[in-house]
Image (cartoon, rainbow, N blue to C red):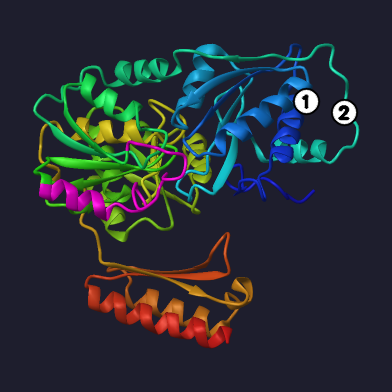
Amino acid sequence: MARKLFGTDGVRGVAGEVLTAELALALGRAASEELRSDHAPQVLIIRDTRESGEMLEAAFAAGVTSAGGDVLLGGVLPTPAAPLLIARYGFDIAVVISASHNPYRDNGIKLFGPDGNKLADDIELNIEARMERTEHPVPDRIGRVRALHGTLEDYLRELQTRFGELDLSGVNVLLDCANGATFRAAPEIFRRLGATVATIADQPDGRNINDGVGSTHVEALGKAVAEGGHDLGFAFDGDGDRVLAVDRHGNVVDGDELIAIAALHLREAGRLPGDGVVVTVMTNYGFHVAMEQAGLDIAVTGVGDRYVLEELRNRGWALGGEQSGHIIDMGFNATGDGTASALLTLEALAGADLAERKGMEKLPQRLVNVPVPDRDAAMTSPDLAKATDEANAALAGRGRVLVRPSGTEQLVRVMVEAPTAEEADSVCNDLVALVQATSA
């Protein structure tokens, strides 16, 4: 059966148009039926700050209770709180209502199973099949909906347990909370650890989430850090599973650099199982050079945190992530956690200046998204394949070329990394022109 509803990160779409209350109700009922065992499912629901979150929360809860499950409402919390709360309370399902870094009009529903992991593909397919049924079993009872108080404190307690020995006294940090799910949690844990904290984008109104702020618009944070005399800054995304940093000069430090800094620190601390790191095909070539020089192994996956997590489990490793700032440290949580990743960065720096970081030397990178009528057809061009191979051969040992179709849009993504920006631009321009010509 082909997947129709679930994407790589749950169900997502424009709230009220694609992701309707009716769909959320059907999804809640089907998920409860599929994951029911010998007792009524106990379901946690948390959400970000989008105005549609309350509607979808209520609808999903109605679906759960109509199938005989009980719902605990955890309120506004970062996505990574979900698996931690599953472990603490033993929920059968945790639901996160969020569209991550997307605009406020979008929303999404992500499901975590009783092991704290996102649901496997076969379970998602079974849930989709149940949603298509016209008849459903009548439960012995109608479930209940109750508020679960203290969830923010539960999440903060987990962070404080992990980073309790981290003394941030004297650290002046600016946090961009994207008007999203971290707006209370992130500033609070930094203050508890002793930092001097200033914040931007911490006044959510339901519509301003990710609006020119957060990890997808980090340039504003860079300017604010430099002009405000802060030591560094961190920008989270709407649901708090990603983070990017900026140094005191306002320079952006992306996920590749943060992972490199963390990898070297965890290896030195004896907390990097297998002396290996999992990254994606988009990871900068300079990362590979730095890790090879440090004697660390690298495994490469397709783009997407679920693939990174799968490879970490397969290898028994602990650290992996993406250039976007989605970083997984299995020593703390089996999903990306922007706040924990920011604290891990400060732990790794041990008081040093982020502007003087030495994790890796990034190669200049040029990335162009080329609109095409048919991304798959464009990728079958023998001329494009030949040009890509020739460019990679010319850059062997110095850089690389990656040409791949978008997973969600009619685009071909052309990425080139080279020792100089001029060479990266030249090679990229030639390949972009070829994609356009072969797609005309």
Instruction: Please state the extent of the stretch shown in magenta in the rendering.
Output: 202-227
Q: Are marks 2 and 1 in contact (CB under 8 Å)?
A: yes
Q: Residue at x 21, y 30 (%)?
A: 347
Asked if residue 192 lies left or right of residue 283, the reply is left
Disc 2 on helix, strand or loop? Answer: loop
Residue 358 visible, this orientation: no
The magenta stretch spans residue 381: no
Measured from the top left, where is residue 301 in percent x and y?
48, 51
Q: The residue under label 1 is which amino acid type?
A: Glu
Looking at the rendered structure, which numbered label has been put on residue 136?
2
Q: The residue under label 2 is which amino acid type?
A: His
Q: Earlier in the sequence, mark 2 or mark 1?
A: 1
Q: How many marks?
A: 2
Q: CA distance from mark 2 to mark 1?
A: 9 Å
Asked if residue 144 lies left or right of residue 211, the reply is right
Residue 215, above or below 57: below
Quarter holding residue 332: top left
- For the stretch drawn in magenta, the main secondary structure is loop
Asked if residue 15 lies left or right of residue 137, the reply is left
Q: Nearer the viewer, residue 317 or 245?
A: 245
Q: Nearer the viewer, residue 60 or 242?
A: 60
Q: Residue at x 43, y 57 (%)?
A: 281
Measured from the top left, where is residue 53 in percent x and y?
56, 35
Measured from the top left, where is residue 187 in percent x and y?
27, 29
What is the residue that sits farthest to the front in this orientation?
Answer: 205
What is the residue that sits farthest to the right in this orientation?
Answer: 135
Looking at the rendered structure, which numbered label has been put on residue 33?
1
Quarter of the image where the C terminus is located: bottom right
Q: Nearer the viewer, residue 349 or 310?
A: 349
Looking at the rendered structure, which numbered label has been put on residue 104?
none
Quarter holding residue 361: bottom left
